Amino acid sequence: MTTKERILKAAYSCFSRRGYLGTTTREVAHLAGVSEVTLFRLFGSKKELFREVLINFSVIPDLRSISPPNGSGCEVLIDIGLKIYSSLREKKEFLKILLSEVTGLTGEAEEVYVSFVETLETLLLSVFSSVLALPQGELKLKVKVFGAALFGFFTSEEVFQGKEISSEEVRSFIEVLSRSICGGKE
C-alpha cells in the first residue's frame, strides 16, 4: 500500500468516526503513520483530502467500473440502482456522520459536497445518455430524480428509521423507479 493510500484509508476511518468537522489532519497523519507535512505534501489541505476520500470511498468508483450497458434502458438503470444502493449500504456509518454535520458545514466542506454531487451526476448522465434517447435537459432532470429518489429511500428507511430493507424490497423500489424514469416502458 502506498503512502497516499494509507493516508486515504486513515482519513476515511477518521471521517467515518468523527466527521469532517471533528477530524484533524494531525489525527489522520498519526493513524496513517506519516507526518502532517507528508499529508499536506500529498493532498495540500484537509479539504482536498476530504475530496479524495469522497471520490475513493463513495459510489463513484462503483459507477466508474460499470461496463458498457447491455440490454434495455430500464435494465441498465435497475443494475445501476442496485449497485448504488449496495454501495450506500457499505458506507452507511460514513453517511450517517456526514449527514449529521450538513447544517454546520464550512464553505470549504460545502464546496467539496457540491463538487462530489456534480461528479456523481456527470457519471450518471453519461450512462443515462447511452441508454435513453432524450434531450440533454430532460436527461439531466431524470438523473436528478433517480439519484434523489434512491438516496432519499435509503436515508429515510435505513439511516433515519434504522430498518434493513430486504433485497426484494430494494429491487422492487429500484424497478419501479427505473421504469418510471424510462417512461413506464421496458
Image: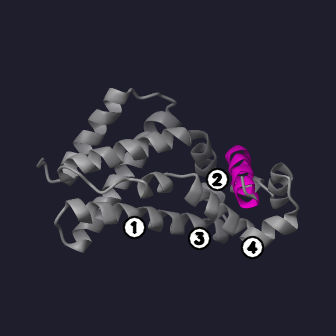
Q: Quadrant of residue 139?
A: bottom left
What residue is disc 3 on?
A: 111
| Residue identifier under label 4 | 44
Q: Nearer the viewer, mark 2 or mark 1?
A: 1
Q: Is residue 34 left or right of residue 143?
A: right
| Residue at the (46%, 51%) spot, across then down | 62
The correct choice, above or below, for 48 with respect to 181 in the image is: below
- For the residues labelled 2 and 1, say whether their Cβ atoms are less than 8 Å apart: no
Q: Nearer the viewer, mark 2 or mark 4?
A: 4
**Residue 22 locus on image (x, y percent):** 76, 53
Mark 2 vs 4, N-terminal side = 4
How far apart are labels 2 and 1 at the CA level?
Answer: 25 Å
The residue that disc 1 covers is: 122
Q: Earlier in the sequence, mark 1 or mark 4?
A: 4
**Which label sits in the foreground, 2 or 3?**
3
Residue carrying label 2: 101
* Apparent side of residue 119 relative to residue 98 in the rendered image (left or right): left
Q: CA distance from mark 1 to mark 4?
A: 25 Å
Mark found first going from the N terminus, 2 or 1: 2
Q: Residue furthest left?
A: 185
Categorize mark 1 by other alpha carbons within 10 Å: few (<14), some (14-19), many (20+): some
Q: Which residue sits at x=81%, y=57%?
A: 24
Is mark 1 in CB contact (under 8 Å) with mark 4? no
N-term-proximal mark, 3 vs 4: 4
